[in-house]
Image (cartoon, helix red, strand yellow):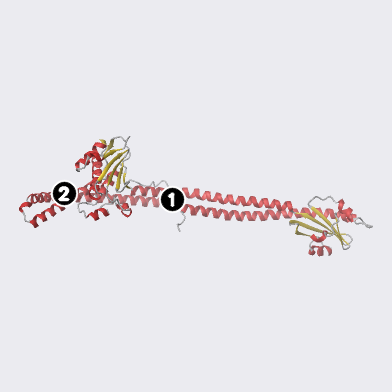
Amino acid sequence: MRRAGLRTRVSAAFAIGALALSACVTFVSYELISNTLFRERERAAVRATYFDATVINSGLTGGEPEVRELLQALDIGADRYVLLYRSGQWYSRSADEAAGSAVPVKLQEMAASGEAGAQRIRRDNEAALVVAVPVQGQAVFYEIVSLRELERTLQLLALVLTAVAIMVSAGGAAVGWYVTRHALRPLAAVAEAASGIADGDLDTRLDPDAEPELGRLTASFNHMADELSRRLKRDRRFAADVSHELRSPLQTLAAAVSVLNRRRDTLDERSAAAVGLIADEVARFQALVDDLLELARSDKPVQREPADIGLLAGRVLRSRGLPADLVEIVPGTPVDWTVDRRRVEQALGNLLDNAVRYGGGPVAVRIGKGFLEVDDDGPGVPADARSTIFDRFVRGPAANARGGGDGTGLGLAIVAEHAAAHGGKVVLLDRPGGGARFRIELPDE
């Protein structure tokens, strides 16, 4: 299972934290508000009940009063229900014989002992408050106060607080996303700088003043880039020095082998074969030294000048004995390019040599706006070899399958270096119908 990214994890943590905090605040707020509202409602109900009980108590003085008329005379609203228990009988404003069933037994027992009290109940699936006040003559006055409106208010309050908690959680997630976006921006700069170095831009550095908190990381990265640049320059210089030192003895050896090779007819068969092998290896060695020198010079700035790219491609084809009509110019493509002629000629020549050796020969050289393509008629390049095909001293499966020994493994690496020197790149594609397509992309200047 793929692990979530850092930004997602931090945003989720912010959201969960905000949700937990808002849930606690919501719960505490709801409890405090609901308790306060209930206490205030109960106080109001008790005060109203005592006032009504005073009226009833004065009406029960002397004789045999008409209880129902007393109850009818009370000024109560639709949310209050009054009862009177006297001489073992329940009285209400209506002729409801079961009127006293809503009063809890414990409250009745407490009121019968002469103590006033109150208790919450559920009546007709609604919350209510029963208040009991003893009056004269062993009678008890009860008032049932509906808490329906208070319950609705609390339900609305719970809904609002829940919505606020959800919005706070969403806000926490948004804050987490925003914070991580800005917090990870320096790391994105590091990743971009590392990508630039990987692409060959060895002058890429991080600004030490951009993020003071990451000063140590910035210093370490820049030190690494400096060391890498120095090492690569040292390696190039070493390769150039070695190649230069090898050229003189190689030229002498090549001249001597050339003299022997011209007299092969006077030698016996085994000696002639040995001279031929030596001549081939010397030629291959010379090609390797020349390629190493070319790679050593690849970090030098390009020498741009106007060039007719169509004529340049045709000249490279003819120099290798290939027909110039392989060149195809995409309609609308400008033929006058500002490039380093030597580098472009060598890059195109290396692609053509690669197609001849390993790709069944080139079938087209296509020129479009900002790119050169060489199509071959070979088996193509397997997927597992594509990531290293432009590395140095790498030879593809086709080279090994054909048993060719004349390649140095540096041809495509030189193409990549020349493309990078122009600010471009070389990519490997599949040719429609089979074969490989190597594209050199050169940005406009």
Q: Earlier in the sequence, mark 2 or mark 1?
A: 1
Residue 297, can we see it? Answer: no
Residue named by callout 2 = 247
- Where is residue 1 drawn, in percent x and y? 45, 59
Residue 321 picture quarter: top left
Instruction: State how far apart marks 2 and 1 are (Cα).
Output: 53 Å
- Where is residue 246 drawn, in percent x and y? 16, 51
Residue nearest the observer in this picture, 274 or 88:
274
- Where is residue 164 drawn, in percent x and y? 61, 50
Relative to 41, residue 343 above or below:
above
Residue type at numbered disc 2: Arg
Residue 79, can we see it? Answer: yes
Q: Residues within 10 Å of mark 1 (few under 14, many from 20)?
A: few
Residue named by callout 1 = 213
Residue pictured at 53% horizontal, 49% vertical = 174
Report helix, strand or loop for mark 2.
helix
- Where is residue 352 drawn, in percent x and y? 24, 45
